[in-house]
């Protein structure tokens, strides 16, 4: 299977705009074109352009195995959804690595961050039940908080639409996830650069966000929404004490800390340059 060019995820260096595993790209992206050529919605296979007229937000994974496009028309829609934004294509050829429902939720968050508030008519996606392998067409959208609409399109496609109350919860959830991931990275960066006080500050912030995440999960459960399950639990203050103690950090378990999203250059001894008060 050809995926085209591979991209490095440079978001944490500030050179790419990324959201989870999604990287913001452009409508001429070669890997996305190849993926769209294998999607049932593709009308002109091989054409350089794979997006619709209007404004498009194109997202891809670094390995080029998944693509997602948010689209908004310059004009009023011809269906009953007026000014709704739409997922014009979502193709995931690596579902073992990228859980489709989570990818959809992160794509919604990316769309919100790039375009701003969603229109009152919400966000929709059409699914052709005759062109997907699943017996429950659109199930990944349902797991991402979309609701199946009773009226199909003229082509017989099923429409899935977000309810605004659910969408707000999903966006809040994804915002916390995004900042949690960034905090974990900053903890690693601070530890590797010897900025231990900053590591403690990021650790405290991460714990507060993690508590808030569980509050959101409870609200999502009440609305029968699938909550995010792939976030690493932040390391504790006790864990940081172990790493930053020059007399005991040799006991730190590399696998344990990496399971918490903390990556340290264990080849170099971590030593305090000066006395740190915590």
Image (spheres, rainbow, N blue to C red):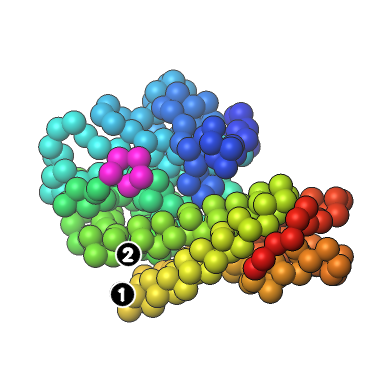
Q: Are marks 2 and 1 in contact (CB under 8 Å)?
A: yes
Residue extending furthest toward the top: 48
Split into 4 quadrants, where in the image is the N terminus? top right
Foreground: 232 or 21? 232
Residue 4 x %, y %: 60, 29
Residue at screen point 29% across, 61% down: 168
Residue at screen point 62% across, 35% down: 8
Real-space CA distance between mark 2 and mark 1, rounded to the nearest whole angstrom: 10 Å
Residue at screen point 51% across, 50% down: 20
Asked if the stretch drawn in magenta spans residue 153, the answer is no
Task: Give the tally of numbered discs.
Answer: 2
Give the dominant element type of the magenta stretch: helix, strand or loop. Answer: helix
Residue 91 x %, y %: 47, 44
Q: Is residue 129 visible?
A: yes
Asked if the stretch drawn in magenta spans residue 115, the answer is yes
Q: Which mark is residue 223?
A: 1
Q: Is residue 173 left or right of residue 73?
A: right
Q: Which mark is residue 169?
A: 2
- 116 shown above or below 104: above
Earlier sequence position, callout 2 versus callout 1: 2
Q: Is residue 156 visible?
A: no
Residue at screen point 60% across, 67% down: 234
Q: Give the class, few, some or many, for how many residues have Cα within 10 Å of label 1's Cα (few <14, many ≥20).
A: few
Q: Is residue 163 left or right of residue 135?
A: left
Q: Give the class, few, some or many, for how many residues have Cα within 10 Å of label 2's Cα (few <14, many ≥20).
A: some
Q: Which residues are magenta?
A: 112-116
Q: Which mark is residue 71?
A: none
């Amino acid at each position: 299977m050809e995926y085209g060019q591979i991209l490095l995820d440079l978001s944490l260096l500030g050179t790419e705009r990324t959201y989870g595993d999604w990287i913001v790209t452009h409508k001429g992206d070669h890997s996305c074109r190849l993926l769209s050529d294998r999607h049932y919605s593709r009308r002109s296979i091989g054409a350089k352009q794979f997006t619709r007229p209007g404004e498009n937000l194109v997202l891809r994974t670094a390995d080029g195995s998944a693509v997602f496009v948010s689209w908004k028309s310059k004009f009023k829609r011809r269906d009953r959804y007026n000014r709704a934004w739409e997922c014009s294509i979502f193709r995931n050829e690596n579902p073992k690595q990228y859980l489709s429902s989570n990818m959809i939720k992160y794509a919604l968050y990316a769309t919100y961050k790039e375009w701003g508030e969603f229109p009152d008519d919400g966000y929709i996606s059409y699914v052709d039940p005759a062109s997907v392998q699943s017996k429950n067409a659109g199930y990944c959208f349902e797991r991402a908080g979309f609701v199946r609409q009773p009226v199909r399109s003229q082509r017989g496609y099923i429409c899935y639409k977000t309810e605004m109350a659910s969408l707000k919860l999903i966006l809040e959830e994804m915002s916390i996830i995004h900042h949690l991931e960034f905090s974990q990275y900053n903890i690693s960066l601070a530890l590797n650069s010897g900025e231990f006080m900053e590591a403690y500050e990021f650790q405290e912030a991460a714990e507060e966000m993690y508590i808030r995440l569980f509050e959101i999960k409870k609200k999502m459960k009440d609305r029968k929404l699938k909550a995010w399950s792939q976030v690493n639990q932040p390391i504790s203050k006790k864990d940081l004490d172990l790493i930053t103690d020059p007399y005991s950090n040799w006991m730190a378990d590399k696998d344990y800390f990496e399971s918490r999203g903390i990556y340290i250059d264990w080849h170099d001894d971590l030593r305090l340059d000066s006395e740190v008060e915590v």
